[in-house]
Image (spheres, rainbow, N blue to C red):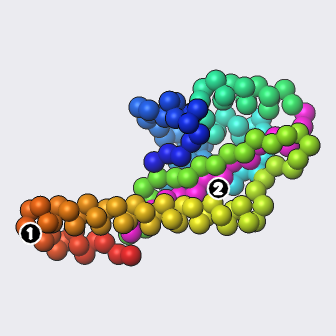
Amino acid sequence: MTAVPESEARHMIGLQLHSYRTSPSFRVIRTGEAICLNQLTKENVDDVHFCDKEKAKIIRMEIGQSNNRRFASYLVLSVTNASTKIIGVLGVYTLRASNTLPGFADHELDFYQGVATRLSQAYCLISACRLFARTVQSGTVDILSLSRLSF
């Protein structure tokens, strides 16, 4: 699932992510722990996946040429299903003016954690509705499938 500005949506269609060792998104998928890079630097910006390749070039070039390390921040949170299996990630990056401090304030971290939790709950609700619809259509109850649901 992806939430992006309309201008970036075209970059998401047909996108396939491939795991590589240093990607923060895949580290979150492997460990389940949130990752917050308060400063994207020359050393870690290549680990961040940007869907818009043109924007990625610009961001990487500006960070590479900048002596100011206060440029951007990146946050990755897990999105889970009812059995706490990770089904995706919520990735948020910020681009800041050079005169502002990078990073996320505590209330921003709380907000995005809440968004990830709500996405997880929405996924569970949609899964339950689909299971219910299949049950109604088939006329049989799949007890094994029902036992996997927990709210």
Is residue 83 left or right of 98 when viewed as pictured?
A: left
Residue 69 visible within the image: no
Q: Residue at x 20, y 62 (%)?
A: 133
Residue 69 % position (x, y): 86, 41
Mark nearer the viewer, 2 or 1: 1
- What span is colored magenta in the figure? 67-82
Residue 145 % position (x, y): 22, 68
Q: Residue at x 52, y 52 (%)?
A: 89
Q: CA distance from mark 2 to mark 1?
A: 43 Å
- Residue 127 is labelled as none
Marks 2/1 in contact by CB < 8 Å: the verdict is no
Which residue is labeled 2 in the image?
Answer: 35
Indicate which disc, 2 or 1, sits on the residue closer to the N terminus.
Answer: 2
Which residue is labeled 1 in the image?
Answer: 140
Residue 115 location, quadrant: bottom right
Is residue 20 left or right of 42 when viewed as pictured?
A: left
How many C-alpha atoms fall within 10 Å of the one at disc 1: few (<14), some, or many (≥20)?
few
Residue 45 % position (x, y): 70, 37
Q: Residue at x 65, y 64 (%)?
A: 111
